[in-house]
Image: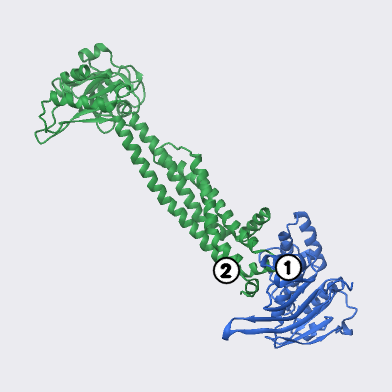
Chain colours: A blue, B green
Amino acid sequence: MTDEPPLIQLEAITKTFGEGAAAFQALKGVDLTIERGDFVAVMGPSGSGKSTTMNILGCLDVPTGGVFKFRGVEVQALSRDQRSLLRRRYLGFVFQGFNLLARTTALENVELPLLYRGEKKRERRIAAERALDQVGLLPWADHTPAELSGGQQQRVAIARALVTQPDVLLADEPTGNLDTERSIEIMELLTRLNREGITILMVTHEAEMAEFANTIVHFRDGLVESIQRGARSARHEGVSA
Amino acid sequence: MIGITILLAMREIRRHLLRSFLTTLGIIIGVAAVITMVTLGRGLTASVQEDIAGLGSNVLIVFPLETDRGPPRAFDEDDIRAVEQQIAGIEAVAGSVNANAIAVHNGQDWATSVQGADSIFFAAQSIDVIEGRGFSAAEEAVGRDVCIIGPKVVDEIFGTGDVLGEKMRVGPVSCTVIGVIDERANAVGGGDDPDNTVLMPLKIVQRRFTGGTDVQFFVIKYSDEYAPAAVQSQLIELMRERRVLQDGQDNDFNIIDTGEINDTVNQVTGVMTLVVTAIAGISLLVGGIGIMNIMLVSVTERTREIGIRLAIGAMAREVRLQFLTEAVVLCCFGGLVGIVLALGLSTMLAGLIDIPYLFDPAVNVLSFVFSAVMGIIFGYYPAHRASKLDPIDALRHE
């Protein structure tokens, strides 16, 4: 275990948008290490750099400076297509706005990542049904997003992220569009998935939701302000939905 | 990967059925128009060629012409004899005259035209007697009061029933019907409608209708082995000599070469088909631009979807291929529907304007391939735009 590099390593990451006088430095040297199996909540006010960091961690964006290693591989050296393949293989995304394909059934939405993996029809279906079952939505497999509640849509989105059995699940404000009750359901689901072995990185501005995480990282002004490890409150221990 | 991409494209098209249909409407109409025009053009050419074939092949028709020296001068028997004897390669020469007359039978009267025509004329003009018989040599020699009538005359005067052996009055002559000719699309002399005619031996028409032994025009059938130009130039020389034309005087006669008419008509129908097809082709091009337009709108509208696809690991070329495939599938679909539409349309129109329907596999295949190529050409730019989107911006897109 000790030989294995950390899952994610950020060293002196900087990110600058724009050029010259209009340049804006969003990240000013972020150092962060995330171990496999962790559940990390990233918090901070708007403009603190938490979204930029998530985009870099999600391999959707590349840092301007510093070193980002994912499973020991330097991501900034990869091409756009290589980063696509990395996302396809190791990452799952959950967004605030659910981002399901409209007029497409839950099952087809969940199958989508597998299509890009070139899996056979039968295997796609089995895996998609298993993922929907994991989030408790198998009975809704044939429903389109319009026929599902917000909480259900987010669970379909989580199933879509899970279906490829990724190493890391990146969730950007996953409860941002949900009421408290649904939010807690989603957080309990994420906690359970984390227990089953998946590493979770979640951006949130709700302290209540961050309490579900094991590690809470606070951002401020483009820097990591504090890292709170082993933060999972006793109140949420033992929760398994 | 292609299979998956086609599957994705089909799903996308299914998600927007109405819009997909409206988008391809341009292609559908374009393909249908091109195929219909080419098919009808071919039918028209075939139909006109058939009409011209009714004039006979290797046939020259000689008419007198009005000149500034005076009215048209008719030809006489000696002219015909001279042509027969003095020009190489002549197989038959037959003169003809015609006159308008009222035909009467059993109190029914009908305005028709009488044409004097011997069996040589029948042969040179490819006139088929489908009922009864043609004129005998004896009937022609004395100009007997027998007649062979066109199908229209049968309809108008006799209605149904046997017409052979019936007596009818045509102008001043009472004659016995001995034959009926086939419908003809075209003919020389005998009025506007070749089916509304009464044919009698030349001699009786000359004697009772036109007077004298002159002929109004004559037809010449010549052998294949002789060049039409050579036959024509000899004919012109002979006729100028016989009609005592000085050097520098215009011909007071005109020679129509059915072969030349054929060439001209082919040329005209060919050009017509080309022009109309080009116009139809422009509509196909407009259809392609329509595809590009909708695909661009679609890319903008589906920016977020593209962001999702990129986030879950689609490569740029997969996104590009997806949109390109959508455009090509739409165009192919449009092409297929267009072919089916063209099939119905050209059969219907061919029936309506009374020309044969000639299915042309080449133009159908070509139109289909062309519409697929249009999908590639007009689908590429929108697809390229889609593939170049930044996943973060795309995901943020509202």
Q: Which chain carries label 2?
A: B
Q: In which quarter of the image is the C terminus of chain B?
A: bottom right
Which x, y percent locates residue A202?
77, 78
Question: Callout 1: helix, strand or loop?
Answer: helix
User: Which mark, residue B300?
Assistant: 2
Disc 1 chain ID = A
Residue B375 at least partly seen: yes
How far is the residue under mark 1 from the one under mark 2?
Answer: 24 Å
- Residue B50 picture quarter: top left
- Please indicate, yes or no, whether residue A142 appears anywhere in the rendered image: no
| Residue density around tag 1, few if under 14, some if 14–19, many if 20 or more, within 10 Å | many
Among the 4 quarters of the image, the one containing residue B178: top left
Decide: few, some or many residues near mark 2? Use Cα within 10 Å; few <14, some 14-19, many ≥20: some
| For residue A80, side relative to residue B157 (left or right) | right
Report if the CB atoms under discs 1 and 2 are less than 8 Å apart: no
Q: Would residue B347 be found to the left or right of residue B237 on screen? A: right
